[in-house]
Amino acid sequence: MSGRKPVITSSAAQHFWDECAKGRYLLQQCTNCQTFRYPPGPICWNCASDGVEWVESPGRGTIFTFTTIGRAPSEEFKPYVPYTVALVDLDEGPRVMGNVIDCAPEDISIDARVEVAFEDVGDAVLPQFVLSGATAS
Amino acid sequence: MKDKPAIVGAATAGVDALEDPTDYWGLAQVVSARAVKDAGMTFRDIDGVVFITSVWPPERVLTSAAYLAQTLGIKPAWAKMIPYGGTPISEHFMWASMAIQAGLATNVLCVASENLNSRLTRGGVVEVFAKTANNSEWEYPFGPLLPSNFGMIAQRHMHEYGTTSEQLATIAVSARKWAALNPEAGMRTPITVEDVTSSKMISSPMRMFDMSLVSDGAAAAVVTLPERAHDGPNVPVRVMGFGECVDSQNLMFNKYLTKMPGLRKATDQALAMSGLARDELDIVYPYDPATISVVVELENMGFCEPGEGGEFVSDGKIEPGGSFPINTHGGLLACAHPGPSASMIQMVEAIRQLRGECGDRQVPDAKTALCLGEGGFYAWQVNVLGRE
Ligand SMILES: [Zn+2]
């Protein structure tokens, strides 16, 4: 599939997406106050420090909310309908968006535990989520 | 009230899509002429313009207010552009009032115009909004629609409070009842709760009839100096107060989704400036791109307790003849949602109600109204309007 490539807006973001392509889920952590942040950027939203390091995350989290889409926004998403978009609270703190894949939409619920699984969608490798215990394809 | 700037002219165009132009600038020019005429003025009397950007290039440019002023022969002009998206779309009266109070302008023409439906069609609008309302790096690759944001809010509200799809559906049913009384409204056919809960699932739990229309439409109003309020032919409507606050732009940055301290703050600011209490408001205009929006907004503006919104809206009080009338034109759900002009259409309806011009849908002796505008997901602006 094409057309799902993120519009990459910074060198920090480029690093995040490059590492996703290698199957590594990296988060930025502030070296001053230890707060994790997402999306990546130069400054800590908690303490305004520019001290930062990249930390590999196991990508585990909890579904805060989700929605299952019955009508594709554009051509490139039609093959996936119905698919689920979720906001996931990572154990490190940040809230991220991703699809919950490799399960039936009716098995997805708020507070369900999930973990990152990388999905190659053709022109990008996206950090997606699977229900914990499920096997990524 | 005598020291508040006064709205002395108001108009809509293209909302019923019958005889008016369907091009962007044509709509803006026609509605401007109508509003100025309604105020008993000509373009020569206008020295300020507030205009909002279009959804889509080539008109999505920040020079549009100056361009509109020159096409209308308004010069010299104080010209203020409001960007659509990210900031609330209802900022016209705030900027006009501040400009008048600062001495920058005396008669300010406030305009909003869009021809979403004619230019893009419904399918095109769905795609454009999915790509522009959602972040193109951290959201769009995962395929959310614009309505997915409301789906995620509703899912959370249902989880926390037990709100039901049937309760949300009553909001869409009520919007159609108001729209049936408004000759300009786009969707005037009555619907039932079952029609809503059996309509196509768009982004769960939001179905087709939980979501707003896609429309053309323009609206405009003229704001003048407090002391000129009575110079024109109309009952003046005062800009009593306004407040503005951002909770978030994208939902992944919003901690709660169901709780909005910024909306509460904006509402409190606007009411404090107006000197009015919540129970002194005759009509409330929530911003209703989706049914769930009405519930979370009424809760967070302080008209009911957190979690009680579903019950609050579903006992008939928001319908025509009810004790808590909302969106008397039919709202974005049943009158029109032409993107950037949705809020001005809503505010012109409020002005017409306060003037007593609304015929079958007139709220008896309405003197005060509160209008809410939203930008992105949870950037808020509240306007309180009133008459003597
Ligand atoms: Zn920090």
Image (tube, rainbow, N blue to C red):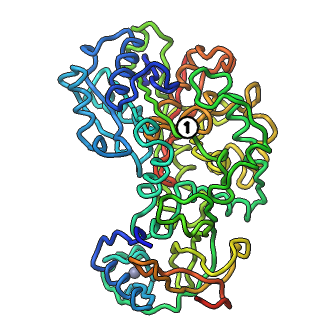
Residue drawn at 29 percent across, 31 percent down? B102
Of all residues shown, which one is farthest toward the left? Answer: B76
Q: Residues within 10 Å of mark 1 (few under 14, many from 20)?
A: many
Secondary element at tag 1: helix
Residue B125 left/right relative to B277: left
| Residue name at image x 64 percent, y 28 percent | B328
Point out residue B339 in the picture as x, y percentages from the top left corner.
Answer: 46, 41
**A67 and A113: which one is in front?**
A67
Q: Residue at x 30, y 70 (%)?
A: A9
| Residue occupying image coordinates x 35% and y 32% | B24
Q: Is residue A38 left or right of residue B318?
A: left
Q: Is residue A109 visible?
A: yes
Above or below for B211 versus B22: below
Q: Position of residue B351 (x, y in %)?
A: 52, 22
**Pointer 1: what residue?**
B271
Q: Position of residue B316 (x, y in %)?
A: 79, 35
Name the residue type under label 1.
Leu
Identify the image quadrant of the C terminus of chain B. Answer: top right
Q: Position of residue B105 (x, y in %)?
A: 27, 25
Q: Is residue B310 above or below residue B82?
A: below
User: In the depicted view, which residue is nearer to us: A78 or B340?
Assistant: A78
